[in-house]
Image (cartoon, grey):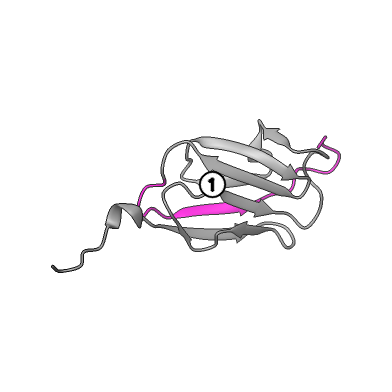
Amino acid sequence: MKPTKNVQFLSLLILTTATAYGETRVVPQHFLRRWDPVTVFFDTAVGPDSAGPEDQPERFVRVKPAHPGAYHWIDSKTLQFRPAEPWPAGEDNAWTGRLPPEGSPR
């Protein structure tokens, strides 16, 4: 019997990262599996002091093209996106970490 590759479990997405400020990192940096979360690490505390949902993620991160899902603060420097739908295979996504304007509430 000839071995076969099960492609539906290996659907990959090419991920391009761009940082706007400091040492902001987006993980993973290259490929996503269908339900992988995307985590943004900021080098300064930009989020709330405690973990919880983020209702205005565009203040901190942008993704193109947009994808349905939810953002959640893990801590004041770590924002995670969990997709509501699987990532489309082979789609390029550009993630940009942003810092909110000075003086805006965390």
Q: Relative to the observer, which residue lies in front, 105 or 49?
A: 49
Q: Quadrant of the N terminus?
A: bottom left
- As drawn, is 73 to the left or to the right of 66? right
**Residue displayed at 66% across by 30% down:** 55
| Residue 6 point in image, percent of width and height | 27, 58
Q: Kindly report the secondary structure that dominates the magenta region of the rendered protein.
A: loop
Q: Relative to the observer, which residue lies in front, 71 or 22?
A: 71
| Residue 5 point in image, percent of width and height | 25, 63
- As drawn, is 79 to the left or to the right of 70? right
Q: Residue furthest top?
A: 55
Queried whether the magenta region covers residue 19, the answer comes back as no
**Residue displayed at 35% across by 57% down:** 10
| Residue 30 point in image, percent of width and height | 49, 63
Residue that label 1 marks: 63
Callout 1: SS: strand
Q: Relative to the observer, which residue lies in front, 44 or 65?
A: 44
Q: Which residues are magenta?
A: 87-106
Q: Residue furthest front?
A: 1
**Residue displayed at 46% across by 46% down:** 35
Q: Relative to the observer, which residue lies in front, 9 or 86?
A: 9
Q: Quadrant of the C terminus?
A: top right
- As drawn, is 102 to the left or to the right of 21? right
- As drawn, is 14 to the left or to the right of 105? left
